[in-house]
Image (cartoon, rainbow, N blue to C red):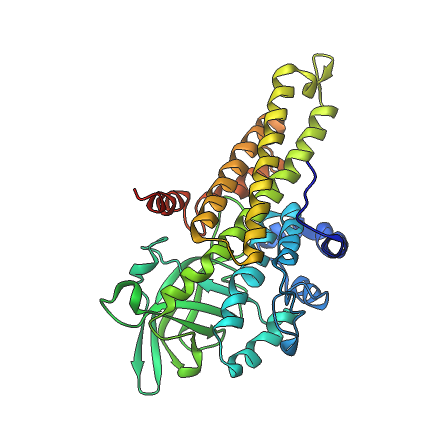
Amino acid sequence: MDRTLYDHDHELFRSSVREFLHRQVSPRTEHFVEDRAVPRDVWIEAGKHGFLGLRIPETYGGSEASDYRYTAVITEEFARISASLSSCLGIHIDVVAPYLTELTTENQRRRWLPGFCSGEILTAIAMTEPSGGTDLANLKTTAVRDGNGWVLNGSKAFITNGCSADLVVVAARTTPGAGARGITLFGVETGTPGFTRGRKLDKVGQPESDTAELFFDNVRLDESAVIGEVDRGFTHMMDRLPQERLGCAVSNIAHVDQILRETIAYTKDRNAFGRPIGSFQHNKFLLAELVTKVEAAQAFVDQAIVAHVDGTLTAVDAAKTKWWSAEIQNDVLDHCVQLHGGYGFMNEYRVARAWKDARVTKIWAGSNEIMKELIGRDLGL
């Protein structure tokens, strides 16, 4: 089914993204896996092509593309190469960018945004804690006022870009006992005394994405580190989570669509009992189901993108889009592995790695169970 979401300019942009990936990324993906990281020169090249500053004002080195569809295009194309690359990029350009453009002071924007656009300042966001998961209202990391500044203590877990980030947006409790109303966001830069990183986490999937534990031991921050309003960090995060969840959905469906296409090609070439395995009725019917599921999910995600561009995407609809896309992604990839037979369990095959990479999408950005809870509350249940 043809998509009507994008116009000629979006497709021209897609062509430039594909060319960049073809030249700078695809030939090196195996090295990224071995190193468990995306090297800095890739980020710098992405910055030179204008891919990192899509939503950043031109004053600070960005291209000020207010149309979210350009962000969706780059997310889709990175996801077709690797879910890990899409998640690393997405944290930077899709998740952190709104915090740094919408909540910062002029001095903060001048300090951080030019490097953000060039790839010289990589970013991460540190919400999740070892004991809290998605329970953001009960953060244990604290920031206590001390004179004209703050002292930050605590730890964060499962932080994408955690090893490579030069700037981390950290959520911390600033008013004890205030629940969601006592959280503040801080910009913590690499090299700040007391800020250390733990081991690079050994994950089941997405090895190219560097994921780390972060530790804050009496980290002294001045007032210029505060992002947004004091004690309104929870609201700031909730306001921006719909875009994060939509970005996840965009990546999920682009990722599974690519692997499904490759699986269909495989079933045409792989023979058993004297004929292509795709010609057997069971497999033919299964592939018909999988293609329909992915196209239907794509239409749902496209409509959510349109709503976001129009400023009408609700938190509940973003939750629906996030959990359903992750469910479809994982279900379809499981079938793709099965269709590859024993080869589907070999790491040298993209389908095996894609299957492992996708599992986390039902967990991060708010687990699928949390998404259903949000939807259920909206139903008055």
In the image, farthest residue toward the bottom: 147
Residue 331 placed where, x, y %? 52, 33
170 versus 13 height, above or below? below
Name the residue: 62% across, 58% down: 71
Name the residue: 25% across, 67% down: 178
The quarter of the displayed image where residue 283 is located: top right
242 versus 257 height, above or below? below
Quarter of the rendering occupied by the C terminus: top left
Name the residue: 50% across, 45% down: 321
In the image, farthest residue toward the left: 177
204 versus 125 height, above or below? above
83 versus 59 height, above or below? above
Residue 91 placed where, x, y %? 53, 59
Q: Nearer the viewer, residue 137 or 266?
A: 137
Residue 100 placed where, x, y %? 52, 71
* Relative horizontal placement of residue 307, taking residue 9 as reference (left or right): left
Name the residue: 42% across, 63% down: 237
Residue 250 placed where, x, y %? 58, 48
Count up the numbered dots: 0
Q: Nearer the viewer, residue 12 or 381?
A: 381
* Relative horizontal placement of residue 41, taking residue 171 as reference (left or right): right
Regarding residue 373, the answer to whether it shows in the image is: yes
Quarter of the rendering occupied by the N terminus: top right
Q: Nearer the viewer, residue 66 or 167?
A: 66
* Relative horizontal placement of residue 98, taking residue 274 as reference (left or right): left
Q: Nearer the viewer, residue 327 or 2?
A: 2
Regarding residue 208, the answer to whether it shows in the image is: no
In the image, farthest residue toward the top: 273
